[in-house]
């Protein structure tokens, strides 16, 4: 008879497949965990600010419930958990300007926060009514690769693009090793017109990596050098102003897929897909479906694809074998998919003539979406 101890200690067979798929679009419920460290003596102020915030969040579409907990060991430590019908409505809210304004009263009483987001995979039997159609569970665990992907995007003043590109390309990379558990793997910068995109890949703690990078003298010098060219002014010497700027510039990854092939010879590209107002999440979902399907094709030249989305900004980062023209999104032939893509893209922002793109404009618009590579640094090049 096999004992419980023997079952636990038995070696786990690792999957041989290198296929990675991470996504917010599987429709399952979302659990958000916010760890909060409150200043000593500010607990009552924090509680009042939370109660005001809670009354506002209750009306946000997709919000189900939330709880506020205080540590029994350290009264300065609090835990906020919330449940959402799925990830997209939460991301729409948390990445909005409205959310930034809504949580501002908390900043004066909070020393530090950390947000964690989880799809619900399993729960105690009987906790959910059998006929509940909105409380969906993730069907199967996803297989990751240990990397967190994140992006920042902002705009500079028209006419300053060449100057900004030179500044961004000319800096010494920060030390890759953040701590014993966190490492910077890759940083890539692109531009599309006057829009700057910085993507990073991190093993370990994303917040620790971002703090590490922001403290490096070389990085700070670059940030100060581009300050005069930003469309929206920022003061990095003011912690609150800096926090708001980077919160609004954040473009989180909403989908990532990696095929089995490592393809070390792949070339990295970025494509900027501005969505029509209010259609960003829908556009990101369409691109994610295309990439997910393409990853099952062994002849597809795209080895990895990550989709970043915030409001109407959608960016697709792809590692491709050969020419980008082989990217399946660039060669969509299905008339229904082309029509849907054209209905979601804002061709005017891309620089296309006219305001209402047609299906036959797809290839032209996708060519306009290509971003210019400024610099691509891996940790082994640091």
Image (tube, rainbow, N blue to C red):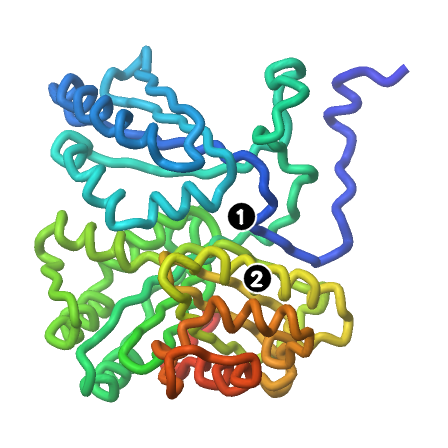
Q: Is residue 348 left or right of residue 257?
A: left
Q: Quadrant where the C terminus lies?
A: bottom left
Spatial separation of the CA atoms under disc 1 and disc 2 = 13 Å
Q: Residue furthest top?
A: 72
Q: Which mark is residue 112?
A: none
Q: Residue at x 11, y 65 (%)?
A: 233
Residue 20 position by quadrant:
bottom right
Residue on which the image places disc 2: 286
Comparing 145 with 245, the one in front is: 245
Q: Residue 160 at x, y = what percent? A: 19, 84
For mark 2, give the secondary structure: helix
Q: Residue at x 38, y 88 (%)?
A: 353
Q: Residues within 10 Å of mark 2 (few under 14, many from 20)?
A: some
Q: Is residue 381 left or right of residue 286?
A: left
Residue 335 position by quadrant:
bottom right
Residue on which the image places disc 1: 24
**From what the image shows, is residue 65 above or below residue 321?**
above
Comparing 226 with 123, the one in front is: 123
């Amino acid at each position: 008879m096999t004992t419980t101890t023997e079952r636990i200690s038995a070696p786990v067979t690792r999957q041989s497949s290198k296929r990675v798929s991470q996504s917010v679009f599987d429709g399952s419920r979302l659990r958000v965990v916010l760890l909060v460290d409150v200043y000593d003596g500010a607990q009552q102020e924090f509680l009042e600010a939370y109660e005001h915030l809670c009354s506002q969040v209750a009306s946000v579409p997709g919000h189900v419930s939330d709880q506020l907990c205080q540590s029994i060991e350290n009264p300065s430590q609090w835990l906020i958990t919330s449940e959402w019908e799925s990830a997209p409505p939460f991301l729409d809210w948390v990445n909005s300007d409205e959310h930034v304004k809504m949580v501002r009263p908390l900043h004066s009483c909070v020393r530090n926060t950390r947000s964690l987001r989880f799809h619900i995979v399993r729960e105690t039997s009987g906790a959910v009514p059998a006929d509940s159609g909105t409380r969906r569970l993730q069907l199967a665990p996803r297989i990751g690769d240990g990397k967190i992907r994140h992006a920042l995007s902002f705009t500079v003043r028209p006419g300053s693009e060449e100057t900004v590109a030179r500044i961004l390309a000319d800096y010494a990379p920060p030390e890759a090793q953040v701590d014993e558990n966190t490492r910077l793997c890759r940083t890539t910068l692109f531009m599309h017109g006057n829009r700057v995109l910085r993507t990073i890949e991190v093993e370990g703690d994303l917040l620790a990596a971002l703090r590490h990078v922001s403290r490096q003298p070389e990085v700070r010098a670059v940030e100060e050098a581009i300050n005069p060219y930003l469309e929206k002014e920022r003061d990095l010497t003011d912690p609150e102003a800096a926090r708001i700027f980077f919160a609004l510039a954040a473009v989180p990854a909403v989908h990532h897929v990696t095929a089995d092939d490592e393809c070390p010879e792949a070339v990295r590209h970025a494509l900027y897909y501005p969505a029509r107002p209010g259609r960003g999440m829908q556009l990101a979902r369409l691109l994610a479906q295309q990439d997910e399907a393409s990853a099952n094709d062994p002849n597809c030249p795209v080895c990895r694809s990550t989709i970043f989305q915030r409001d109407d900004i959608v960016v697709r980062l792809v590692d491709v074998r050969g020419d980008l023209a082989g990217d399946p999104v660039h060669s969509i032939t299905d008339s229904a998919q082309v029509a849907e893509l054209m209905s979601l893209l804002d061709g005017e922002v891309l620089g296309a003539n006219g305001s209402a793109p047609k299906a036959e404009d797809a290839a032209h618009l996708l060519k306009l979406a290509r971003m210019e590579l400024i610099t691509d640094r891996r940790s082994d090049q640091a």
